[in-house]
Image (cartoon, grey):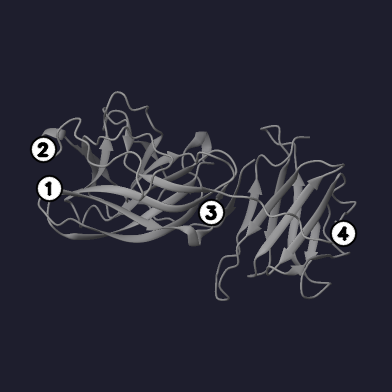
Amino acid sequence: MRWTPWFLVMVLVSSSVFAQVEVDQWKNLGRGTTLWPQVGPTCSGGTALDGSLENGYRALSTADARFVQRLTPPTYPSGLTRVCACWIGRDPIDMPFNFLIYDDDGQGGIPGKLLGSVPSVVSIPTIFGQEFVGESCAFLDLRTESGGLYIGVQWDAEAYIGFFTCSDESLTTPPAKMYRSSNGGLNWLPVAGTVFPKARALSFRGEFVTLVDPAPPAGPWLTTSALPGYQFKSQIAGNRAATLVADCVPETLCLAGAIPTRAEAFVRIIGPRGNGFLWPEVIRFTVAQVELWIQKTPAGPINYYKLAGVSQDSDVLNGLVDREGFLP
């Protein structure tokens, strides 16, 4: 089972040429030298690194360089709480950048929806120095039920030409799924290949925590003839039990909150889709937190979904799609 929030992302197209820095240009980066251990307190999960970093990659002639790598949590469901990356700097200078987290639901398994970003700064104190930077992303409330996430960085490679993201080129490192973009994530190209033929993995890491679904709240289950074979419970704003709206659109469960006749969330279950699963979909019309429990009856599995609350002035009301929700 897998679900992720969705929202609209506007992108601008620009051109870029990517280039590789050969390892012999870094005197303090000898092949096989361990810079950062694979397991540590900063970010320990979901990486293919073998513990050594042999090179650094960068982009040229672009103000929007993006490198990402697919990471998978050790257990499901998992929450992503921290993201980390290694940088190499030619000059002693501070550089602002953003951590990026994408869903892995793009066509053919490439990065899909942008789930969030976290601003950060890397400080390189010496010439040809390196630094491992981590930031908390728990506030994004990202939950992974299956598959993985693409985690990486975005920086102005045109203004900061002396910064490179660390890479692992050890033959013993399993090849990771890595992509790069220079146009806001509109198009993605593999990192490994003609440009970076020795690339095995990037230095991006994530800290995952195992999540435990809360039990359904007390009270009766909600049912509707529009979605036969399922029953529902929902809470809005953390403590308000949702109720059914009688006058609802076809094949949809409409849930009310403060006002019994006003829908604050739509629920649908569509399919089976091409992957053989039925897909629960949730659309909300409130800034308050929305929680939903769906059980396939009789006595079937219970799926839990949560849409975190957003600020009152938010321009985005996100929804969700679970592409592995229920088997027919």
Nearer the observer, disc 2 or disc 3? 3
Label 4 amino acid? Pro
**Residue identifier under label 1:** 128
First along the sequence among labels 2 and 3: 2
Q: Alpha carbon of mark 4 to alpha carbon of mark 1: how far?
A: 64 Å
282 or 209, which lies in front? 209
Q: x and y percent of residue 113 in the render?
A: 51, 49
Q: Can you say whether 316 is above or below 227 in the image?
A: below
Frontmost residue, 14 versus 268: 268
Q: Residue at (24%, 52%) from the top-left corner?
A: 157
* SS assignment at label 2: helix
In the rendering, which numbered label is found on residue 142? 3
Spot occupied by residue 144 in the image (x, y as percentages of width and height): 56, 46
Badge 3 or badge 4: first in the primary sequence: 3
Residue 10 visible here: no
Q: Amino acid at mark 1?
A: Phe
213 shown above or below 277? below
